[in-house]
Image (tube, rainbow, N blue to C red):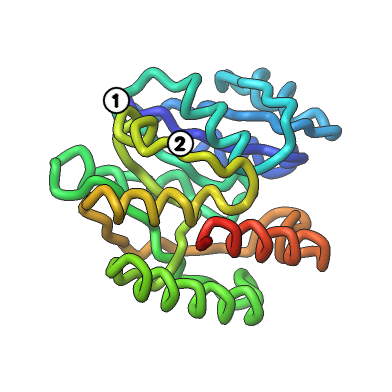
Amino acid sequence: MIDVILPVLDEAEAIPWVLERMPADYAPLVVDNGSSDGSAAVAERLGARVVREPQRGFGAACFAGLSAASADVVCFMDCDGSLDPADLPLVADRVLAGRSDLVLGERHAEPGAWPAPARLANRALMLEVRRRSGVSLRDLGPMRCARRAGLLDLGLRDRRYGWPLEMVLRAAAARWRVEEVPVPYHPRTGKSKVTGTIRGTLRAARDMARALR
């Protein structure tokens, strides 16, 4: 069994689609990060395990899920409908086979799914990651997989939007085998908390810069 950590903040509309497409042997672990739209109740009604993390922040929700997980191998993915859980084996199979330590899903976006400014910022960030760590990636993919014990040993500290970047940088420093595989990326359900607002975009940029430092 693989635990799939799903950080959630007001995603009640997307949760049913995500949970109904979860593959067999992949157990959804929804981390509610202070939703006001009943996301936690929707997930519980559909049979998902729910953890509540009152400390706001993407990294805080991810770490709460990692701490609550019990499976040897864990996946992370957004729960906004932009990623299809049916694609989780694409990233998990390489970890399960022992070929990789951390696998990220490189987003292959449908039209309108990934705003151009966010795509360009991601490209610039990946060039900086390559320069600093030697790891060549095209995307800081939100679908990813690794072994739980190894992630805990990395000592990730960021509890905001720098979490995904810190994971890659610390994994590279620990000489993990890091790779990416292509996954489809669809238009999300609802408005993004990051690229959908100026405040969210600036906060994410600030957190990423702190992780790079």
Contact (Cβ within 8 Å) of mark 1 with mark 2: no
Q: Nearer the viewer, residue 213 or 164?
A: 213
Using residue 79 as the reference point, say whether residue 138 is left or right of it: left
| Residue displayed at 67% across by 44% down | 14
The quarter holding residue 187 reads: bottom right
Whether residue 90 is visible, yes or no, is no
The answer to whether residue 187 is above or below residue 142 is below
The quarter holding residue 200 reads: bottom right
The answer to whether residue 29 is above or below residue 8 is above
Task: Work out whether mark 1 precedes mark 2 in sequence or the reverse, and give the earlier one.
Answer: 2
| Residue displayed at 56% across by 19% down | 49
Q: Residue furthest right?
A: 36
Whether residue 148 is visible, yes or no, is yes
Q: Give percent across and percent down for residue 116.
A: 63, 81
The residue that disc 2 covers is: 22
Secondary element under disc 1, as helix, strand or loop, is loop
The answer to whether residue 155 is above or below residue 140 is above
Q: Give the alpha-carbon distance from disc 1 to disc 2, as whole Å.
A: 18 Å
| Residue displayed at 56% across by 22% down | 48
Q: Give percent across and percent down for residue 127.
A: 42, 78
The residue that disc 1 covers is: 72
Q: Give percent across and percent down for residue 94.
A: 21, 48
Q: Residue furthest front?
A: 213
Indicate the amino acid at tag 2: Met
| Residue displayed at 50% across by 73% down | 125
The N terminus - image quarter: top left
Secondary element under disc 2, as helix, strand or loop, is loop
Indicate the amino acid at tag 1: Asp
Using residue 146 as the reference point, say whether residue 96 is left or right of it: left
The quarter holding residue 10 reads: top right
